[in-house]
């Protein structure tokens, strides 16, 4: 079997963080990733901060995985809940022809993939400890469909356990219990169908997110795009659905990064500071 090249996969992977709000956090993460990566077909991995206040995530287009549809990475060690997590710092994966780093610094959770020397030069100036992850336990990214199936399977396991208890009771009590078992089994099948519909609604009707989720998603979309480009946000404000911001990007960024910031933006080159300032 031919080994899948990892460079093209890691080059499409983004990392970010969101506030662990009372709404559907994974829905916010989906919205962010969908806008930045321009696809609904995503694989994601999500983990919480130690204090539970933030959710960190990886996301990449499912198409990058080709036929396999599976991908796991030792860079998951950057998640605070991972057994090989070593605190703040740069989690580095070095491979032939490229390196990928996850920068974990407080709320900052950034992915950087490039040639090894470019990555090393960048992280050298961060003054953060570097943790090599070659020996870390890999965690798998999961598709939305895969997550739905796993949740449905967990529900089915609970249904089977309940059914087994009912069957055992029927063997002791007799026909009356067997009738009860049939009623309960029918109810369980109905509940299972309702649960499947609810889960499918979460996965397929993501556009019905709460206003808070949409606002967080929009901010994180801008933040993730800017961070991936190696820039920073100078100012950001959202009033209702009206958004305004000023961001600074390295002068080498392509038009794709600017386009990802949305319509109605103006980009001006600041030659004195070697940056592009984008205003909306």
Image (cartoon, rainbow, N blue to C red):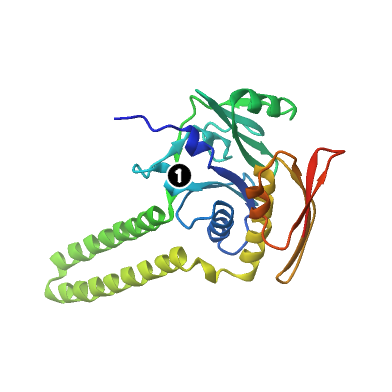
The residue sitting at 61% across, 63% down in the picture is 22
Q: In this view, does 189 lie above or below 69?
A: below
Q: Percent from the top left, x then y, of residue 12?
A: 53, 42
Nearer to me, 198 or 13? 13
Q: Which residue lies furthest to the right in this view?
A: 272
Tell me the quarter of the picture where residue 183 sits. bottom left
Foreground of the two, 119 or 267: 267
Please state if 169 lies on the left or on the right of 261 as rendered: left
Q: Provide the secondary structure element on which disc 1 rests.
A: loop
Q: Which residue, given by chain and number where applicable, does mark 1 sit on?
A: 141
Instruction: Sort mark 1 into few (<14), some (14-19) or many (20+) by Cα contacts within 10 Å.
Output: many
Quadrant assignment for the C terminus: bottom right
Nearer the observer, 175 or 194: 194
Question: x, y percentage for residue 208?
Answer: 53, 71
| 138 over 25 or under it: above or below | above
The residue depicted at 29 percent of the width and 62 percent of the height is: 159
Q: Nearer the viewer, residue 116 or 176?
A: 116
Q: Residue at x 34, y 43 (%)?
A: 67
Q: Going 66% across and 59% down the picture, which residue do you hit?
A: 262
Give the percent coordinates (x, y) of residue 254.
66, 44
Q: In this view, does 70 lie to the left or right of 111?
A: left
Q: In this view, does 153 lie to the left or right of 50?
A: left
The N terminus sits in image quarter? top left
| Picture mark count | 1
Residue 196, given in percent of the width and then of the height, sits at 36, 67
């Amino acid at each position: 079997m031919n080994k899948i090249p990892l460079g093209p996969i890691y080059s499409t992977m983004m990392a970010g963080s969101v506030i662990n709000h009372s709404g559907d956090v994974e829905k916010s993460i989906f919205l962010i990733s969908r806008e930045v990566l321009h696809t609904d077909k995503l694989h994601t991995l999500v983990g919480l901060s130690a204090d539970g206040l933030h959710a960190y995530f990886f996301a990449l287009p499912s198409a990058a995985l080709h036929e396999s549809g599976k991908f796991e990475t030792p860079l998951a060690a950057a998640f605070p809940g991972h057994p090989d997590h070593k605190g703040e710092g740069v989690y580095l994966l070095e491979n032939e022809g490229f390196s990928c780093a996850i920068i974990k610094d407080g709320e900052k959770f950034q992915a950087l993939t490039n040639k090894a020397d470019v990555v090393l030069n960048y992280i050298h100036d961060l003054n953060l400890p570097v943790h090599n992850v070659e020996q870390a336990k890999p965690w798998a990214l999961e598709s939305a469909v895969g997550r739905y199936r796993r949740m449905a399977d967990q529900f089915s396991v609970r249904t089977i356990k309940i059914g087994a208890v009912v069957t055992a009771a029927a063997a002791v009590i007799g026909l009356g219990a067997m009738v009860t078992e049939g009623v309960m089994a029918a109810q369980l099948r109905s509940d299972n169908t309702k649960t499947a519909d609810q889960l499918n609604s979460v996965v397929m009707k993501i556009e019905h997110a709460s206003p808070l989720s949409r606002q967080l998603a929009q901010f994180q979309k801008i933040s993730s795009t800017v961070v991936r480009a190696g820039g920073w946000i100078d100012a950001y404000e959202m009033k209702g659905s009206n958004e305004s911001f000023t961001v600074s990007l390295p002068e080498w960024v392509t038009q794709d990064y600017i386009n990802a910031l949305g319509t109605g933006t103006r980009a001006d080159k600041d030659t004195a500071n070697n940056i592009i300032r984008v205003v909306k």
